[in-house]
Image (cartoon, grey):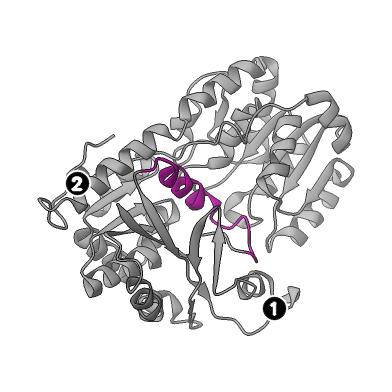
Amino acid sequence: MKLLTFSTLYPHAGRPTHGIFVETRLRQLVASGQVESRVVAPVPWFPFRQQAFGDYARHALAPSEERRHGIEVLHPRYPLVPKIGMSMAPVLLAQAVKPALRGLLERYDFDAIDAHYLYPDGVAAAILGKHFGKPVVLTARGTDVTLIPQYRLPRAMILWAARTAAAMITVSRSLKDGLARLGVPPERITVLRNGVDLDLFRPTERQATRERLGLRKTTLLSVGHLIERKAHHLAVGALALLPGMELVVIGDGPELGALRVLAQRAGVADRVRFLPAMRQEELRQYYGAADALILASSREGWANVLLESMACGTPVIASNVGGAAELVTAPAAGVLFESRTPAGLAEAARKLFSAYPDRGATRRHAEQFSWAATTCGQIEIFRAIVSPRAAPGTAQPANA
């Protein structure tokens, strides 16, 4: 089967960890030998590459095309219009991508569009599918269900795309339930959870790694984009209530300055280390060396960092949002907390360390979440769609 994978959430030379979960799922699918794919991963047009312009400048560093892990990736530019951009984004995105797809079709006549994130990507993919006569599979991943549909026009466009799609995928049961509440028939939605690369994320030589990284105390780790939704501030605040512990925050984003100020005001600046986003090969060293991973987010779809940490043998302390309850299902995995406050997080940390799990058991818990089932589920869906007996919109794969 020949697929076109379409998403603005895809790594590129300027942002090598951006949307890496989309790339990882695709790599596992292609490795099955039953599917090939080309990727169209549009990036916002931006004229400057200076570091002061942040993420926009990093997107400007994306080449027009590249090859990642043997997969061809195209990066056409699309306009982002201030103020009206959110409402116009799907149409502008689709229009900007049409020339790239026409050129691609001349040498690669794909069978279906595999689109990730419902808005604007999924809506744009639905427009493109109509235009080129290709069936579309949409994957919902988080805020495209939990946040964006709060706005009337995007919600209407998401529901139109869902009706148009040949099949719908969510990465967690909670997202499927959220889509159903929006009005998408649940029988059209298949849950295919993200897996974890168990070869990449694995336990390290723990003591030697801790010494090399300079970790001396009981170490908490908080990983993710430095934005309010990821709630790194709760981890910093909780540290003031957890004497004898240290915190490593890994990520880039607009909240870095505020987090540094908070650490100073809370009197824990000497116990907090801020590190920039890093490649997965380096990140796994911190997972394996830490004593616990904190994820205090206010919203999540399926938090890959939880699985990555557990695969390295490190239990987690996670807010009970999104798919977290589908991951943290045993004491070996870690603990969930309901009160998203520094005190609530600190209490969850004390609970974890009062009955700290065997790290081997934590690893074994993660081994339940390999990519095999997700890859098989995708193949089943795409086979049903591209079969001459199945018209777009009629595929009904088995639901998880």
Q: Is residue 116 magenta?
A: no
Q: Check the image and report above or below for 363 versus 370.
A: above
What amino acid is labelled 2 in the image? Ala
Above or below residue 136? Residue 295 is above
Residue 86 located left or right of residue 221? left
Give the camera-side residue of 142 and 354.
142
Specify the label residue 25 is tagged with: none
Image-quadrant location for residue 332: top right
Residue 243, can we see it? no
Residue in view at x 37 percent, y 33 percent: 373
* Disc 2/disc 1 C-alpha distance (Å): 44 Å
Q: Secondary structure at mark 1?
A: loop
Q: Is residue 260 left or right of residue 225?
A: right
Which residue is disc 2 drawn over?
384
Magenta span covers which residues?
Answer: 13-33
Which callout, 2 or 1, points to the residue nearer the camera? 2
